[in-house]
Image (cartoon, coloured by chain):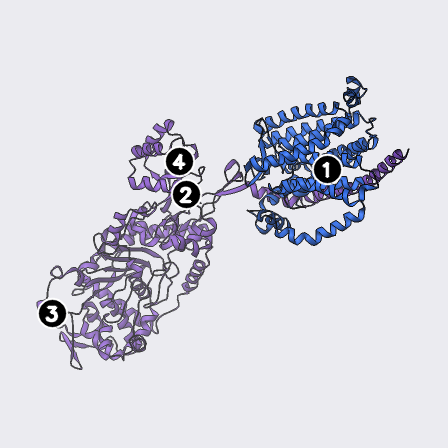
Amino acid sequence: MYHYKRLNSDQSFFQKIKNLDYILLTCILILSILSIFIMYSTDGGEFLYHTKSHLTKLVVFFVLMLTISFFNIKFWYFCSYLLYGVIILLLIWVSIYGIKVSGSQRWMNLYFLALQPSELMKIGIILCLAKYYHRASIEKVNSFLSISIVLTIILLPIILVISQPDLGTSILIALSGLIILWLGGVKIKYFFLSFITFLISLPFIISNLQPYQKLRILTFLDPDRDPLGAGYQIIQSKIAIGSGGFSGKGFLQGTQSYLDFLPEKHTDFIFTLFSEEFGFIGSVGLLLLYTIIILRIIQIGVISQSSFARLFCFGYAFAIFIYITVNLSMVLGLLPIVGSPLPIMSYGGSSMLATMIGFGIVMSAKVHNQQTII
Amino acid sequence: MIKDNFRIRKSDIINRRMFIIGAAKIIIFGGIAMRLFSLQINDNKKYLTLSDKNRIREWKLPPTRGNIVDYFGNIIAGNLKVYQLHVIPEQVENFNYLISRLKIILQLSNKRVEKIKKKKIQLKPWESLIISENLSWDEFSKINNYLYELAGVKPVMTISRDYPFSDIYTHVLGYVSQPNENDILANEIIQEKFVPGIKVGKLGLEKTLENDLIGINDIQRYEVNAYGKRINQLEYQKGKPGSKIRITLDTEVQKLSAYLMKGKAGSISVMDIYTGEIIAMYSSPSYNPNSFLFGISQDEWQLIRNNPLKPLINKTLSGLYSPGSTIKPIVALSALENGIMDTDFKVKCEGKMELHGQTFHCWKEKGHGWMSLNNAMKQSCDTYFYEVARKLGVDKLKVTADKFGLGKKVLGEYFENEKAGQFPNTKWKINNLGKGWVLGETLITGIGQGYTQTTPIQLCLMTAQIANGGYKIQPKILTDDNELTSEQVKKAMLDSKINDSYEPLYDDQKNIKIVQEAMFSSTNEIMGTSYKSRIDDPKYQFAGKTGTAQVKRISKRERELDLETFQIPYEERDHALYVAYGPYSNPRYAVSIIVEHGGSGSSAAAPMATKLFKLIVDRHQYRKKLSDYKEFSI
């Protein structure tokens, strides 16, 4: 009974609706509508499979996000370790029974959705570490035991994801985890030291990379090395973006995409299409929209009473920032090609599910911002 | 309280560290925006070009070949509309069914069907597959009747080369056909304009003037997708047909030549003795160039190739013959020029001449008796010319022969298969055969046998230069009003203009006159070898010299047998030659006629000249009218 009461706030349902963050909600809605138009364009200006599927998922996951936001932030606090554990189990399950597509085993078939647990882990790791640092006292944060535990929490999913293999997602998980470490107060010198260690061990890491991953790095360094092979994607992507110009070629007028020169235009390269059709103005506008979302999430973190909520919001804001940065840098030819979707815009259920869950928890933190967690 | 303190410290750390990250974020997003700026604003043009390069592809269409016309503007190589049948595989539901339907409608052979199927595999499904390059009207209308049930079939009207006079111009014009690898590699312009279905010149003027005739392709610009499929047409850029080429030949004379040579192997050439314009140039037998346009059938090719009369050889330019007695005007001229003899010089012909134990026979066994130059030329007395040659020597003779164009290509810039022939001298024999010259060889050179080899066009030029009073002319096959780009041909045309300056080839023009009179006697006086072929009407009257070239040494036994021509096997019969010019009172045209294995020049070759001169002289007024009009209009 007590337990039940603790997980419910004193607010009524209508108060909760009133307390929803409408700035964030508006931004997410705009983003969703944009993404449907873009998906319509990738389908060649017809209402086809990708558009329909994307629309359905958006509607379902948007409702899911609202539902999540009505749960007290305390509830998510309690569930954090559990969720982390469940996702770890899913990752293990996938590594044994998962569906294998083009050489990597990442998916589990849920019939309505091919679920990619590694995407969910992007949220799971933030939840788990946010709870850990909420509970840990500031003195013990830098103890050997604490750091060992935290590193284990991070390394466990990374090892599972890297073995799928999926380098891109595992890097995103690692970065999301590390940022919570940073926010949680781990000493700067540790970050510094481990960064140097990383640099030293880089040659060994590279020698252990899969051939296709090495190729991607080489291609990134010189895309013209093999213009019809590995460099093709990045060259065509740059051509599409560059040819967009100041105001773009116009909606449904992107020749690079319309004539199939763009690879992966539904998923990782969705920004390329957007940029080709809407130009510099559109691209900077989209970047601005994402910036507003990130800043709003940080703001929600700042007004949150509990460290858990704050850590989660800051962590999630950073994670979204990282997703965007990695994706855009990739399509703009600033980073090697690692599979990473653009939040909400890219086609793909798991990524959208994870993103919407994240938004849901942030919204829950906003609705219940006065909630303290002892 | 303590706990609260901790909480505050904790949130301080969190907030402070968040602020550092926030700053980093803004810098990074700023960086991304700058990258966008550099790609989309700074390098926009570059990427826009690249994007257009991606999506726009050009398709060249075969250019329209320029016409070739004769002197009077009649088209002798033109373009004809032809009907073709194309199939676009991706629009076909059941390809095998369609092919079997077409096979029945067009009565395609099994071999052809196999070929089509093989070709289909090589093509992309949206590229058109050519089923038939040249449909007859019947086939075309038949296909149109069935069109509703033949999805993917496209009847197409296109343009193809056409030679309306069939075989009479083949050795002059050559023919066009699909280019092979060598054609493409050898000519950059073909390389640049190459499209499947293009036809290029394989021989003759069609090949030499390729760069001017070929024309400029029509270009279609299409938007294509990443797989090269055409999405829509953006532009159609009209090309330009190739230049029109006018040649100096007269179709009427060419036609008559072909008619006269029917069934015989040999050549007829006619030349304007002042301008060097070639009026006719026919090598017999010829073949139909239209057969090569769409690939010649194996049977037809074998028929042409194995014909014993050798139609593939352009005998006018590449046929090498002993000039026989047609060389005698040059021998006489050389002797006169070198002061070896004068018109009073006489030799007694006894039917043969002994030299160092060797016997040299005259064609007339009983002998001609006492011969002067005029008589010797008239009756073509060999003994007389043996004696003249002996006194003259071969080296001096060659100087004169060279001047008149023997042993040198005449139209080399236009016809790559032309042969130079040779006129020997002592040096030539040592260099080429490694043996010293024997006086006996001088004797037979004097009657046009032995090492001397000439082409019919050389004999024609030689005659023309005697006829015009001994002036050098440059033969030409293109009229001066052609505007050509090809360097090689341009130079040849320029040369011909320069050489119209009529450089004299004689030391004393009197000598030319003597030779001319001797040639006149040969045709127009009783006992002359071509007396039977003369025309008394001064309008057409011509002067000439017969020649009979042995292809084989006559043995003693054969000499005793004295066989008639038809009794000798074809390959062993003598070549019949005749060179002539006319009209005698005011000469304008020179003719050389060669009938391979035709027997004697007086019986086989000279009678053709009679018919030729009648036509040539009649045609002259039209030709003159046209050139006068041209000059007037300039």
Name the amino acid type tagged 1: Ala
| Chain letter of the residue carrying label 1 | A
Closer-to-camera residue (B340/A296): A296
Q: Which residue is mark 1?
A: A319
Q: Split into 4 quadrants, where in the image is the C terminus of chain A?
A: top right
- Rounded to the nearest whole Å, what is the CA distance between mark 1 and mark 3? 115 Å
Give x and y (percent) for residue A352. 66, 31
Q: Would residue B319 be visible to someone looking at this image?
A: yes
Disc number placed over residue B559 in the picture, else none: 3
B632 relative to B422 in the view: left or right: right
Q: Are marks 3 and 2 on the same chain?
A: yes
> For residue A306, which quarter of the picture?
top right
Which tag is nearer the camera, tag 4 or tag 2?
2
Tell me the distance, in whole angstroms, between the alpha carbons under discs 4 and 2: 14 Å
Q: Amino acid at mark 3?
A: Arg
Up-down relation of residue A127 to residue B364 (above or below) = above
Query: Badge 4 is on which residue?
Result: B87
Tell which tag, 2 or 1, sits nearer the viewer: 1
